[in-house]
Amino acid sequence: MGKYDWLEKRTLRSVDQLRLWTGNPRLSPEDSHLHISDFVSDLIADTSEKEHFYRLLDSISTDGFIPADPIVVWQSSENDKFYVSEGNRRVLILKLLRHPDKAPKSIRAHIRAKASLIDRDTIEKIRVAVAPSFDDCMWYINQRHAGNSLQKPWSRLQQQRWIAGLYDKYDGDLEKVMSITKSTKSQLDYTLRILQIRDLALSPEIFNQLTDVEKDSVSSHRIPMTILERWFTNSKVKEAWGVHIHVDNVEITKNRHSFFTAYLQWLRYVIRRDEPGIDVKINTRTIDSNLDAILAALPEVTSEPDEVQETGNNQTADNSNNKKEPGAVKDSTEKDANDIADALPKDAEKTIDVHYKNPARRNLVVPTCVLNVQNFKLKALFEEFKKLPMDRYKNCLASSLRVFLDLSVAQYITSEELEDKIHVEYKRAFNETTLKQRLEFLKKNKLVRKSPECKVVDALLHPANDFSLNTLNGYVHGRQVHFVDRDFLNRFWDSLFPLMSFLVDIKEV
């Protein structure tokens, strides 16, 4: 039997029983992928990936599944389940067309429309190539992504992540990685060096100071790798910043704090290079034509030693041990503690637990809560809920809570294409209906009786309840200032969470 005879054989497998591969280099490794909607949200987060995803969706829903290129799977020895190593996007789309309700709420209506074009029974099972093991999948994976067509090749960083994953899997055995990827040693060395530089942006000294938008760009495959490569392979940059790149590590020969400060500012210029008001333009063209001006605009990387030198023999052990490095960046724990202290009254407890459902937490939304939605206003409000300290901005947060609920209800109704039904129900245009009417409509037509989200709506519609729509309306239109303390607002948000989870893709990670 030949080494790759398994690739010629096709076995019929249920689409619903095939598991998607969480290690797929198309996915951001920092995100969790527990549900189908998680895979979809990650794939369509990037504009280019989204366009190819929709093209493939249109092709399959219109022309059916075409088994021209094999779906390659392997069976896990741990749970006997079959996992897709090649063809994850195609299998994901087949799963969505069979079960549109599993799509993210933001695109669910679109998926339902596409699902209506295809006979779901025809995609209940597909023929796949079952590899003897995951190791046997690697050759085909590597060969396949030199191609094109609807199966979009991996991006540069995705290719690099694949190589880095193999390098880690085989404990740095370059010969093994070379045999799988058919790359030369110099090509592998170059890829690993560039990834080392990219990963410096994930260090706490830089990552903790980025905004959420910047973090998303840095931690995903959307960071512009060509600009990063051009910058750090420039000899003048390496000399000015004291960067020496080795296969197994990156050596910073100058002051590390000043290096991280300069790298942080450089990242911000690159990530936001297309935004108005960014004076320093960094791209592959300006790095060649305007390098001196760019270096002058960035913080200087100094040659000062990282550690404080002892200046005398009479210095005590306690003093020397308690000395901090000049300009040292505080760790995240110390930084959070200071932020909490600033946000609290001076006589308040300084060590407050910020976990979900703790009414004494300092922010309305805890950092571990995530929202996947296309609506810009919802996303912006949600991120501000994570940052605004409750004691300073309680009135702003109270009125914004009403706005967030209104936007979430509207987002759900739009994604489910219910506007016409609401128009028929209330004899007025959707935009002219009130939040109360929309909640009543959802309770009557979409919510399951006695479900958690239905109970929340019942409470909102009952004026005598503390956590009611009447209270929310008072935040915006009323003159009273009660019900705006931190504990109450936190408990109000927690009470709304089951309904929010139903309306939009929001969850605790």
Image (spheres, rainbow, N blue to C red):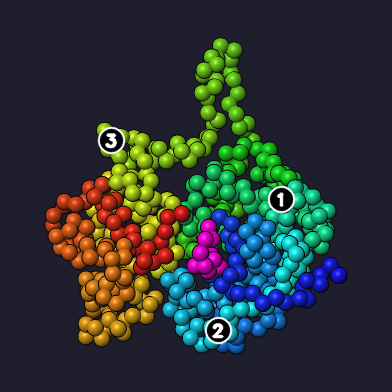
Extreme residue in the right direction? 1
415 with respect to 191 (left or right)? left
Question: Where residue 333 appears, x then y in whole percent?
Answer: 46, 38
> What residue range appears in magenta?
32-43
- Where disc 3 sits, the SS reads loop
> Is disc 3 surrounded by few (<14), some (14 to 19) or many (20+) residues within 10 Å?
few
* Residue 385, quarter of picture: bottom left
Where is residue 219? Give x, y as percent.
Answer: 56, 55
Q: Nearer the viewer, residue 273 or 206?
A: 206
In this view, the residue in front, 355 or 270, is 355
N-terminal of the pair, mark 1 or mark 2, is 2
Quickly name the residue at label 2: 121
> Which label was assigned to residue 348?
3
Label 1 and label 2: CA atoms lie apart by 42 Å
Residue type at numbered disc 1: Asp
Main SS type for the magenta part? helix
Which circle marks residue 168 in the picture? 1
Kind of residue at badge 2: Asp
Residue type at mark 3?
Ala
For marks 2 and 3, give the one nearer the viewer: 2
Callout 2: 10 Å neighbours few (<14), some, many (20+)?
few
Residue 237, placed above or below residue 323: below
Q: Is residue 494 above or below residue 257?
A: below
Label 3–label 1 contact, CB within 8 A: no
Whether residue 35 is in magenta: the answer is yes
